[in-house]
Image: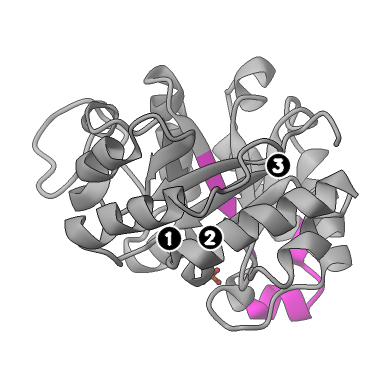
């Protein structure tokens, strides 16, 4: 295993009630998941964070939120502050997911402020970057994601950048059933790693149609340190299989 321990993060998006989230944790725990070689995190909706935290108990399963606001408090109807997330037991937060950039108009500047806020609250940000199908077809994937990465980490000290996680998620691969190829993703991720001081030590995940069957091929690449997984993270057996197969890939 390399210096960067693999991480498998489940992004549950707008799925699971409190009851469903806690049932997931119960069912996942009895599957004897492999935590020895891989770190694992689940990111439920805000409404299920506190209950999921309670259900996790002493299981070494991390808890993350799917977004947050960058200010501590104030007149921001419907928003959730970093402190509120921490209060629910989360220690991770996904920032700048392409679905939020698309549906909530999150900009690179917003993401940068959120990265700073997360670090201030000792939350580990999982910063998402990724190119559209158009940019991919035009051969502009590297340029696009390097621009997003540099913007997200502007004015952040390299020692803080090293504490963050980046998720490279080509937009066209998310939920499509058509992932990028491991070698093509690895090439883009090598460009991401070289774009900001500190990222050589940070974990960079691939995301976009990752399944138990293909996670090993991604994690086996030199610059892929795990995966951010949507639909295949919703079922406890599938999530446990993602961990097992990621673990087997780094052990081999
Ligand atoms: P997917 O989603 O695994 O369902 O493609 C990934 C993501 O959006 O984080």
Q: Secondary structure at mark 1?
A: helix
* x then y, percent, for residue 198: 73, 25
Residue 101 circle label: 1
Residues in magenta, as a range: 126-142
Residue 7 circle label: none
Query: Which residue is depicted at the point 23% across and 33% down?
Result: 88
* x then y, percent, for residue 96: 47, 51
Vertical relation: 188 (above or below) 88: below
Toward the viewer: 251 or 101? 251
Does residue 168 show up?
no
Query: Which residue is depicted at the point 85% across and 45% down?
Result: 251
Q: Earlier in the sequence, mark 1 or mark 3?
A: 3
Instruction: Give the CA distance from mark 1 to mark 3.
Output: 26 Å
Does the Cβ of the disc 2 residue fall within 8 Å of ligand 1? no
* x then y, percent, for residue 34: 63, 45
- For disc 3, the marked residue is 6
Instruction: Give the CA distance from mark 2 to mark 3.
Output: 14 Å
Q: Earlier in the sequence, mark 2 or mark 3?
A: 3
């Amino acid at each position: 295993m390399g210096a960067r321990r693999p991480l498998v993060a489940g992004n549950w998006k707008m799925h699971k009630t409190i009851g469903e989230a806690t049932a997931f944790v119960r069912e996942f725990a009895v599957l004897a998941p492999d935590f020895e070689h891989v770190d694992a995190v689940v990111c439920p909706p805000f409404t299920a964070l506190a209950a999921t935290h309670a259900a996790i108990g002493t299981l070494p399963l991390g808890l993350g939120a799917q977004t947050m606001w960058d200010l501590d408090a104030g007149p921001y109807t419907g928003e959730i502050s970093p402190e509120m997330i921490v209060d629910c037991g989360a220690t991770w937060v996904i920032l700048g997911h392409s679905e939020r950039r698309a549906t909530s108009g999150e900009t690179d500047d917003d993401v940068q402020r959120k990265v700073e806020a997360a670090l201030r609250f000792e939350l580990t940000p999982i910063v998402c970057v990724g190119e559209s199908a158009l940019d991919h077809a035009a051969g502009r994937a590297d340029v696009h994601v390097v621009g997003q990465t540099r913007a997200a980490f502007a004015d952040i000290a390299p020692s803080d950048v090293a504490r963050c996680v980046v998720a490279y998620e080509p937009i066209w691969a998310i939920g499509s059933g058509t992932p990028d190829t491991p070698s093509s993703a690895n090439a883009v991720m090598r460009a991401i790693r070289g774009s900001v001081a500190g990222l050589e030590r940070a974990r960079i995940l691939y995301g976009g149609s990752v399944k138990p069957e293909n996670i090993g091929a991604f994690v086996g690449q030199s610059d892929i340190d795990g995966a951010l997984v949507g639909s295949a993270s919703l079922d406890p057996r599938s999530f446990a299989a993602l961990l097992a197969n990621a673990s087997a890939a780094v052990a081999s």
